[in-house]
Image: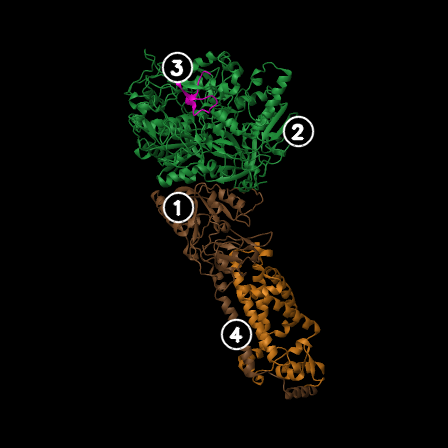
Amino acid sequence: MTNLWADIKNTDLVVIMGGNAAEAHPCGFKWVTEAKHHKKAKLIVVDPRFTRSAAMSDLFIQIRPGTDIAFLGGVIKYLLDNDKLQKEYVLNYTNAAYILRADYKFEDGLFSGYDEAKRDYNRASWEYEFGDDGFVKADTTLQDPRCVFQVMKAHFARYTPEMVERITGAAKDKFLEACKWIAETSAPDKVMTSMYALGWTQHSKGSQNIRTMAMIQLLLGNIGLAGGGMNALRGHSNIQGLTDIGLMSNLIPGYLTLPTDAQADFAAYMRPRGFKPLRPGQTSFWQNYDKFFVSFMKAMWGSAATKENDWAYDYLPKLDVGAYDVLRGWEMMHQGKINGYFCQGFNPLMSFPNRGKLATAMAKLKFLVVMDPLATETSEFWQNHGEHNAVDPAKIQTEVFRLPTTVFAEEDGSLTNSGRWLQWHWKGAEPPAEAITDIEIMAKIFLKVRELYQKEGGAYADPILKLTWDYEKPQHPSAEELARELNGRALADVPDPRDAARLVLRRGQQLNGFGELRNDGTTMCGNWIYSGCWTEAGNQMARRDNSDPGGLGLTPRWAWSWPANRRILYNRASADVKGAPFNPKQKQVWWNGERWTGYDVPDYGPLVKPEASVGPFIMNQEGTARLFTRGMMRDGPFPEHYEPFEAPVANPLHPKVGPNPVARVFKGDMEVFGKAADFPYVATTYRLTEHFHFWSKHVRINAITQPQEFIELGEELAKEKGISSGDLIEVRSNRGRVKAVAVVTKRIKVLKIDGKMVHTVGIPLHWGFTGETKKGFGCNQLTPYVGDANIETPEYKAFLVDVKKLGTTAA
Amino acid sequence: MSSLQSLDIRRRSATVTQSPSQREATEIAKLIDVSRCIGCKACQAACLEWNDLREEVGVNVGVYDNPHDLTENTWTLMRFTEIDVDGRFEWLIRKDGCMHCADPGCLKACPAPGAIVQYKNGIVDFISENCIGCGYCVKGCPFNIPRISKKDAKAYKCSLCSDRVAVGQAPACAKVCPTQAISFGTKKDMAAWADKRIADLKERGYKSAGLYDPPGVGGTHVMYVLKHADRPQIYAGLPKDPKISPLVEFWKGVTKPLALAGVGLAALIGFFHYVTHGPNEVQAEDEEAAAKARRTPAE
Amino acid sequence: MADKNNILDRYTAGARLNHWINAILMICLVLSGMALFHPSLFFLTDLFGGGTMARIVHPWIGVLAMLSFLGLFIRFWRFNLWTRDDSAWMRNVKHVVSGDEAKVPEAGKYNAGQKLVFWLMSILTILLLTSGLAMWDSQFGEYTTIDQKRLAVVVHAGAAVALLIVVITHIYAAIWIRGTIRGMTRGSVTGGWAWRHHRKWLREEVGKTK
């Protein structure tokens, strides 16, 4: 979230699209009801089915799964055509005025630079025109046909309301009603919030779904404002923490990136990370990259990381491919290239797509270690559970180690929520039986491995042998010690750069924030964005003062949020060019004549005068937000509607380019995509309020409230198939099948897509073969093995199935 | 569930004399704002948790309502209705459970002294140890709420968490409701809050939004804010004008004194008849006449 | 009083046993039923081991009472068929109440009043049985709707009260008409009793024996 949960109450319009907050985030949805009651906010829900969020909405629009970009592209066209823009914002705070390179093109569904053989783009042409001064050229009249604004206008000209209806199935009048409501928030003192979750990410173009809405929010001037923003609702209580801490195969903590094979030394690593400003006078915050990186290396290897050895740069693994994401990992396992697997705190057999492939892959492992509080399906993948897990245990030789862990309530620590708050929690109960914390398990394994290296040596033992491990109880590092390490401390006295006689920090002191990080090895910090969470003043995450100066719900003394306890990101953009709040009724930060002040920590240099024209988006080299993104997105600088890999129709915009041309898909998986002729219905998968993923089915009460796997069908399709509510039905894709109870509903209507009637089938995901509920198949029997072009999230939300009635009474 | 608490009793079942009435109490109410309810069933879960109740894990029969009806273990239940209202599709979600009537039909019907009590604050509570399991409360209730246990044959229903309320806590369902669709407070405050919610709904075009506090049962201590208060039946059969059945009123009303009077009168009439007419004794002449008749049968 | 020869048999031992079993069961039903009917009488449940036990045993006693009443019905229905004389008797019932039976037609084994009691008991018993089953939730709760149950409780209460009044009348008549009770205790009545109250029956009996 750019903003925070409580801030949703400050909005004038909530758009829930690509998510279902009322069901998947019921506690957070409270803030929608607050906004509705206290600010008279309206709620628009756009979804393939009428959800419990829709039941709360003022306007619901049903769309076909996988057509969000078409819908949102239509909104962009509406805003541009009707001049519903926050003009001061668009001109000054985005890159609308910048001139693009002449060779950037978009033709017939492809951007310039496409290489069909590699299924990738050469992104060189997706770039600005640079002047002789080395800075980007701009036309502040926005009239130049090569400026971002005009190119964007041309790009989205195709997304007419008629085309939106043809692609998405959304009725034109309702679509235009939504556009009208959205457009009203272009007023400087009106805001809209976007609440989304996996309904946007789990597509082969998931990142672009989100980007399209981000562009709308920029055109409306809603980013950085209270009640605005792009608000990703995280699916687990600490999944924000997972990405923050770098648990992606290509990341190290704080969104720093892992080196590649080509970057042989530290200098080579730093070369593309120079981040010089692209516009005159801009701040480019990433210029501090080396300070974050060196401090991280000092946290890892302490005195073994020196300037002379490039801060132990060689100890870091180097990537030979873009990322070892889950799809690639399991593809390799499927090929027999992985023989051991540590599975910690998740249940891939139920979570990743194409369960048949997963089961085959796991059977090729020599060993599998499952660390989990629950007896997950993954840990029992080798057991025969009848038709719900039809394997032959005699043929599976994988040795499975199940290590029971504690749950969050049985340990101290912090959880990072969607709003980037690190909230400390205290152990509430002793763990049962032999369960111990994940930290303890990992520590013990590490110490054992290190002992083996010490005794027996190894090919390259230094990264293991020299790893800093200075915990009081090496077998069991405490959450406090780890938190202090993430915050960072001074390894030597740190002088003030402006006054060498003055010390910023004495040796051993905890850092106050990432501003104190150094690139000379005098500071260490496990995660620069978490710096400030545990200072000399103590554990900031444990703060519980809910006072709320300003009344916006920012509660700056409750817990601690990254970065720097800032509650709303880009909050400089909530004030106009001169530093006065766009919406005086919801003041956040402002220029008081001498410095930036306000109720939030300004996302800006505190002393940078407004006249200095430094852009508010200081993380970008431009200082402005990107309507046109340069090299960052693999699948295009502008979003484009691509069909899901299994689609009921050809892409109405460009029939030759159907799905995302650079989405992650492996050979072998491409062949098992189903065709509309065999699988005529569009399916989508989702969570229900009553359950949390595959956990809560182990809890009796949750099992009572939603006991058995079911599949939702619209009344029209049910009638065609002679299916009534409660019947047992079978849903098949080209990869597998699910048998479940039919729930026939008015909440899913048949849609007219490009002249063809298209039915949607809804598949909740929660049931498996362990736990308290009735046994189920799980929706990943059906889902395709294809991932987003940028972040490789699998396409769970749009694929094709067929439906068959099996019997009149559910077994 | 138990009378061992600090709530004063206003009325007791099967008790003709007055309860201690000296102390004052504030009437409370639970307000269920259907327009804020997201049907998450947290209230159902909290009810099971707090009251130590567990259902068997059931099956899906083609709807979201699970369990499928109130039971002796399920004292509250989300009921889902898909319906077109005035040309607009709506998914109505209503939390069903005891309404805690001011004039409770269950209490009226109950024959066991103190098995059902109404506290001064308005809560209607089943005191299980006094319950004899006759099921009269089921017949008395205009909302079809009480359920008879298959295990102990006693009647069960929502207690409005009288044990929590007695110590100043909100009912478990209100405590956990994530959107504050369930609020709890004095009946007066709840009515005032409902007015604000109704004004908001009217602004959004729900012209017949209103408060459900049916006068037919003297008002209730569980009230609903409904978007369509003129048609409560569309919310999974919420009765439009609930009243205690006239049959039950008759049974527990005039029948009782009439019956006692009838029986007493019959006995009295007999007694007074005896007093005035004396016994009808066989006379010597009767015996003689009989003896004579037996000797001369041809007569 | 009468000499030993002037005695008539009125009830066999089986009939007497049947009657008194029925009477005892009826008393139990009245006590447990009234206990559940009126709060002021709830204390009577203690006779049965408390409220819950009263609730449990009442319908079972009811079942037994129905069976025993069935026995009585089979024994006596023939004698209770209505005749023209009965109607005349009924029209002049006020003389009977005043103790002047000479002004009404001679009665057979049962007079019209007794026949009325018999038929009222039979009808009310059927009503009590059917309404009782409809409200016997622990056994048959699922077979009726709540509305049907509501009707049943009213019918049950009304029929029970009516039956109780009939029973009171029955008992009072037995007390008032001296010499009656020995018929149901010893099985026989005196000839004088029969002459005075059931002269036609007496004549029939005499006719049979000679």
User: Which chain gets the orange colouring?
Assistant: C
Quarter of the figure with residue A543: top left
Amino acid on which disc 1 is placed: Lys
Residue position marked by numbered label 1 in the rendering: B227
**Outermost residue toward the left?**
A141
Chain at numbered mark 1: B
Picture colour for chain B: brown
Residue position marked by numbered label 3 in the rendering: A125
Picture colour for chain A: green
Amino acid on which disc 4 is placed: Leu
Direction from residue C25 to residue B69 in the image, left or right: left
First in sequence: mark 3 or mark 2? 3
Mark 4 on the same chain as mark 3:
no
What quarter of the picture does the C terminus of chain A occupy? Answer: top right
Chain at numbered mark 4: B
Circle 4 SS class: helix
Q: Locate residue B116, reporting x and y percent.
A: 52, 57
Mark 1 on the same chain as mark 4:
yes
Direction from residue A554 to residue A466 in the image, left or right: right
Crowding near pointer 3: few (<14 within 10 Å), some, many (20+)? some
Chain at numbered mark 3: A
Circle 3 SS class: helix
Rounded to the nearest angstrom, the CA distance separating label 1 from label 2 is 56 Å
Amino acid on which disc 2 is placed: Pro
Amino acid on which disc 3 is placed: Ser
Q: Locate residue A557, reporting x and y percent.
A: 41, 33
- What number is the disc on residue B265? 4
Direction from residue A32 to residue C180 in the image, left or right: right
Rounded to the nearest angstrom, the CA distance separating label 3 from label 1 is 56 Å
Over which residues does the magenta segment extend?
A500-520
Rounded to the nearest angstrom, the CA distance separating label 1 from label 4 is 55 Å
Rounded to the nearest angstrom, the CA distance separating label 4 from label 3 is 108 Å
